[in-house]
Image (cartoon, coloured by chain):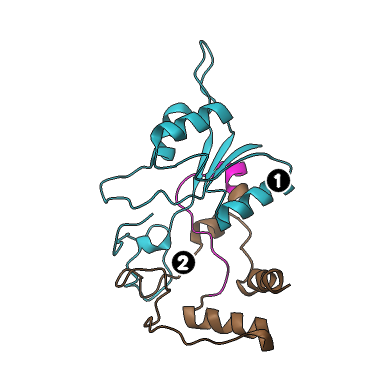
């Protein structure tokens, strides 16, 4: 997608995200589902729903992006996040 | 296309390099050891020597104050166009694609954010 934006010499601000909104919790649940019986669960620190890398109080409550400019200018939408996530899990667990 | 990818040592940069190479591009993959994107001279040197058609900036430029509207990479692309100026030859104009962050929004809206929504980061953003 980034390459296509460069090739087309598109300008301005553009949101480019995979399809389907998902919370961090749902995202992790999907990873666990994909990994299946091989997954091991460890006690998690109390992150209060925050991604671990973010300093306290800086994560937006919700930050779903609408790919409005891409859609309006005819760019094909990116895939549903579950597809590349499944590919990544396959690579990492191979 | 001749493309310079900064942040090539990271996940996004690595995948961007791979995608460009699959497409047959000439790729200059620059990780932090090659180009420190917070160093204007380093960025200028990389763009001048590589003379790319495009710069894909995947490296986080580090915390940016509210007053800093551009990064060294952005300023170098604007000023130098990816090629040294020669007598009688206009600069070639490398196209810059810079990857930002959705943390520029404060998360107060109850709908997905559009590109034209007001930003209000809760902390310094990359």
Residue at the image point whose x is 62% and y is 63% from the top: A78
Which chain corresponds to the colour brown? A
Look at the numbered disc 1 and give the secondary structure of its residue.
helix
Q: Chain of mark 1?
A: B
Q: Compare residues B63 and A92 and report the one nearer the observer.
A: A92
Residues packed near mark 2 inside 10 Å, few (<14), some (14 to 19) or many (20 plus): many
Answer with the quarter of the image where residue B105 lies. Answer: bottom left
Q: Is residue A22 above or below residue B59?
A: below
Nearest the eye: B110 or B52:
B52
**Secondary structure state at the residue bearing disc 2:** loop
Q: Nearer the viewer, residue B21 or A45?
A: A45
* Left or right of residue B47, residue A91 in this image: right
Query: In the depicted view, which residue is nearer to us: B63 or B106?
Result: B63
- Tell me the number on the disc at residue B21: 1
**In this rendering, position of residue B16 left or right of residue B63:** right
Give the answer, above or below, for where B20 lies relative to A63: above
Residues shaded magenta: A5-20
Q: Which residue is mark 2?
A: A65
- CA gap between label 2 and label 1 equals 29 Å
What label sits on residue B85 in the rendered view?
none
């Amino acid at each position: 997608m980034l390459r296509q934006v460069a090739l087309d010499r598109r300008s301005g601000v553009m949101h480019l995200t995979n399809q389907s909104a998902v919370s961090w919790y749902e995202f992790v649940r999907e990873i666990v589902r994909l990994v299946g019986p091989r997954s091991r669960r460890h006690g998690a620190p109390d992150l209060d729903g925050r991604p671990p890398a973010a300093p306290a109080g800086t994560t937006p409550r919700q930050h779903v992006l609408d790919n409005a400019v891409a859609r309006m200018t005819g760019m094909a939408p990116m895939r549903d996040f579950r597809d590349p996530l499944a590919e990544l899990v396959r690579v990492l667990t191979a | 296309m001749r493309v310079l990818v900064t942040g090539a040592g990271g996940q996004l940069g690595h995948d961007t390099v791979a995608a460009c190479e699959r497409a047959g591009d000439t790729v200059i993959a620059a990780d932090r050891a090659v180009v420190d994107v917070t160093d204007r001279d380093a960025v200028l040197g990389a763009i001048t020597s590589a003379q790319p058609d495009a710069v894909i900036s995947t490296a986080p430029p580090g915390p940016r104050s509210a007053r800093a509207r551009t990064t060294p990479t952005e300023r170098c692309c604007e000023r130098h166009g990816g090629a040294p100026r020669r007598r009688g030859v206009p600069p070639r104009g490398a196209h810059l694609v810079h990857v930002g962050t959705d943390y520029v929004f404060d998360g107060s809206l109850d709908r997905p954010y559009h590109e034209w929504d007001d930003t209000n980061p809760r902390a310094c953003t990359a």
